């Protein structure tokens, strides 16, 4: 409401200035109308600029300036090569009109080309080994990325695009309680990463307005920065690899570092509940792997030594089957 009143006040004051100080030799009433129109056009331009992202504004400004410079250079070059002053003046004016307009439109449509984070990578030293890791929403909400960074297993700059932050905020504002909790957890994880001394987090304004899918935008960002995508999304994992983009999947890493257990080995587990079959007990390893133990129902609530009988790899993880031997007690 305050902004609306300010805009009305601005137009009224500008129109009054045109009435009492008429420009261009106009009468008072036409001068006030022209001043009011210019004020309204200024406010309209301000509203459009305020809605645009920084990358779009930056791209349009840089594109226009480059067009002006090129138009001036080409016009001056043509003027020095022709003996017809009228034609030279016309061509020079056309260059100064067309090239800035083309630069403005290209800057808006392809603003990601002029994003500072995209430009800086051309000037960084290759020997520095700076590597960009682009995070998606799923891996931020998962939260294990923070522990991995603190352990020193993930090097380079963690890049969080602005559209990922927007998606994360939409999840945090969801009417569904579970989604809202997950979204807020993701925001807390990002805040923790930014404050951490072991992680270097960069928020980028790089965006692709012509692309709607967040996954496709992430792949484009990875291509621009020559970085890797960090995700838990299986579909994004497959599509990115088809596009030739390297992917770091946290779930795949977690499965890779689980301890290897072979049939015939012995191990100690703590039984916490009954199994589905008769006289079975269930235990869990530190990494969450389920251990099903035969002949151990009466030992629930105790640490027992078991003999591994088989290991089953499923789509959700690994399961270990073992047997408790009374004689080994």
Image (cartoon, rainbow, N blue to C red):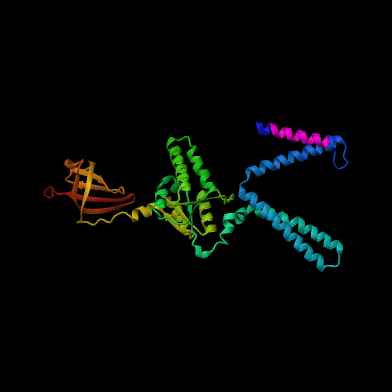
Residue drawn at point x = 46 percent, y = 41 percent: 183
Picture layout, residue 34 above or below residue 133: above
Residue drawn at point x = 69 percent, y = 31 percent: 5
Picture layout, residue 165 above or below residue 154: above
List the single residue furthest toward the front: 197
**Picture quadrant of residue 30:** top right
Residue 289 rendering spot, x and y as whole percentages: 29, 49
List the single residue furthest toward the left: 327
Residue 42 rendering spot, x and y as whole percentages: 73, 41
Front in this rendered view, residue 241 or 226: 226
Q: Is residue 305 visible?
A: yes
Residue drawn at point x = 49 percent, y = 58 percent: 227
Lateral position of residue 44 relative to residue 258, left or right: right
Magenta stretch encompasses residue 13: yes
Picture layout, residue 245 above or below residue 4: below
Q: What segment is highlighted magenta in the picture? A: 5-19
């Amino acid at each position: 409401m305050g902004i609306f009143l300010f805009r009305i006040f601005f137009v009224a004051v500008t129109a009054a200035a045109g009435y009492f100080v008429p420009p261009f030799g106009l009468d008072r009433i036409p001068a006030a109308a022209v001043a009011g129109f210019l004020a309204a056009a200024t406010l309209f331009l301000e509203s459009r600029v305020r809605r645009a992202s920084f990358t779009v504004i930056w791209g349009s400004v840089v594109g226009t300036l480059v067009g002006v410079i090129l138009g001036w250079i080409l016009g001056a070059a043509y003027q020095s090569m022709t003996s017809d002053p009228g034609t030279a003046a016309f061509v020079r004016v056309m260059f100064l009109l067309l090239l800035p307009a083309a630069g403005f439109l290209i800057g808006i449509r392809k603003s990601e080309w002029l994003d500072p984070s995209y430009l800086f990578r051309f000037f960084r030293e290759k020997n520095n080994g700076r590597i960009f890791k682009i995070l998606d929403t799923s891996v931020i909400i998962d939260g294990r990325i923070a522990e991995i960074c603190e352990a020193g297993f993930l090097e380079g700059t963690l890049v969080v695009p602005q559209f990922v932050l927007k998606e994360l905020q939409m999840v945090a504002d969801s009417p569904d309680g579970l989604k809202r909790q997950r979204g807020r957890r993701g925001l807390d994880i990002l805040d923790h990463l930014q404050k951490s001394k072991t992680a270097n987090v960069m928020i980028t304004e790089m965006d692709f307005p012509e692309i709607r899918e967040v996954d496709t935008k992430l792949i484009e960002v990875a291509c621009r920065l020559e970085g890797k995508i960090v995700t838990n999304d299986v579909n994004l994992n497959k599509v990115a690899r088809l596009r030739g983009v390297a992917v770091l999947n946290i779930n795949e890493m977690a499965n890779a570092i689980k301890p290897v257990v072979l049939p015939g080995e012995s191990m100690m587990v703590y039984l916490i509940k009954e199994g589905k079959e008769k006289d079975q007990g269930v235990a869990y390893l530190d990494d969450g792997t389920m251990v099903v133990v035969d002949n151990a129902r009466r030992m629930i609530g105790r640490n027992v030594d078991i003999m591994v009988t088989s290991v089953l790899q499923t789509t959700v993880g690994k399961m270990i089957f073992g047997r408790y031997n009374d004689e080994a007690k």
